Image (cartoon, grey):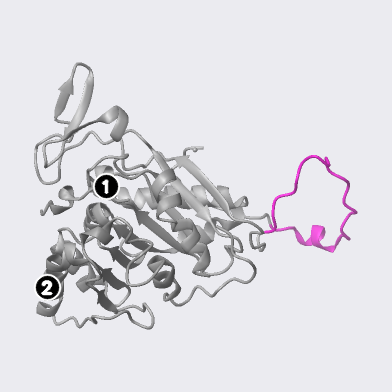
Amino acid sequence: MKRRALLLLGALLMPTAAHAQPKKPKKPSKRQATKPAAKSTPVHAAKPAAPSPTAALKEAKTQLAAFDASPFPYRGFLPDTTKPFLDARDGKRRGHTTGRGDVYWEETAYSDRRSLLYLPQGFDPTRPVLIVLFLHGQGATLERDVMVRQAVPRQIAESGQNIALVAPQLALDALDSSAGNFWRGGHFAKYLDEAAERLMRLYGNRSAGRGFNLASVVIVAFSGGYLSAAYALQRGGANHRVKGLILLDALYGDEDKFAAWFAARRQQAFLLSAFTESTRDENATLQGLLAKRRISFARTLPKSLTPGTAAFVGPTGGLDMHGDFVTRAWQADPLQQALSLIPGYAPFHGKKNA
């Protein structure tokens, strides 16, 4: 496994893991059905009615929620080894030693269970729903980086697509790409199940559960987020839901995992990798692995990201561009453009608000 990502600078709350199951309305008996409807009686004025199951959101909704199926804390082993992830001790404290020799302590870097949830203004769960799973890079926090600096919610809103965002906190503000529980077989599927439940609650109506449970998923990885993406695809147990992968200067290793995934799923999914000079070699390696499998690919941004599409865009700039690549790549706000190219999630109307 390549670890060049470790040489980069940091890129830059209801728990349940059940499916979001809407309650089934009871069918009225024939006798009940023939009775005229009784006049409704007033309810407490102070208690707002639940939103209509067909109502598009009038304003965006954002939440930081602690997940049961979070990537961290993680007290297992490094993948395919018998070496514990938490291999450092200082009294009662446990920590992880990175490949470059830095030690990060569990209590500060590997204990944040939160994920960022976001639904844009106009989001409608009765229409086809796409879940974007965003995996941030090294040295990042959800508030400072994903929400503000990388402007992921804003770019999703401005894409005009019917998208729900879920972004787990990986290693907190640490120069570490560790995937934590995403290294465990089937854990990614558990995470998506819990995300559907929490997105339904954020929307505010149980009728939205079906839409979130059936939604396809596009994984977007930036920089060190590649490792979580690679293992989610290799052993996460949810490839039947993944319809696309977008790598934003994120191919720092595990090219074989990405190639194997796309070779197996190309009839149902797309692959887009945009990069700087920093990951030129790794992108060339992935292209070679696809070519050996006789899988064609483009070296320009396609007109649409349809199943079977594999495209590479770059190199665009050097390492100096890496930290801002989510907002400044082949164009400003590249994530917004890439998401707008995914067909089947028709634009919503009205003013967009992140």
- Residue that numbered label 1 is attached to: 10
Point out which mark residue 289 bears. 2
> In which quadrant of the rendered view does residue 231 lie?
bottom left
Whether pointer 2 and pointer 1 mark residues with C-beta atoms closer than 8 Å, the reply is no
Which residue, as the protein is rendered here, is positioned at the far front?
320
SS state under label 1: loop
Q: Please state which amino acid type lies under the numbered disc 2.
A: Leu
Residue 59 visible in rendering? yes
Left or right of 30 in this view: 214? left
* Rendering coords of residue 48 (x, y %): 75, 45
* Rendering coords of residue 288 (x, y %): 11, 75
Instruction: Magenta stretch: give its range.
Output: 27-52
Q: Nearer the viewer, mark 2 or mark 1?
A: 1
Near mark 1 (Cα within 10 A), the count class, few <14, some 14-19 or many ≥20, is many
Left or right of 347 in this view: 286? left
N-terminal label among 2 and 1? 1
* Rendering coords of residue 183 (x, y %): 22, 47
Q: Residue at x 41, y 60 (%)?
A: 132
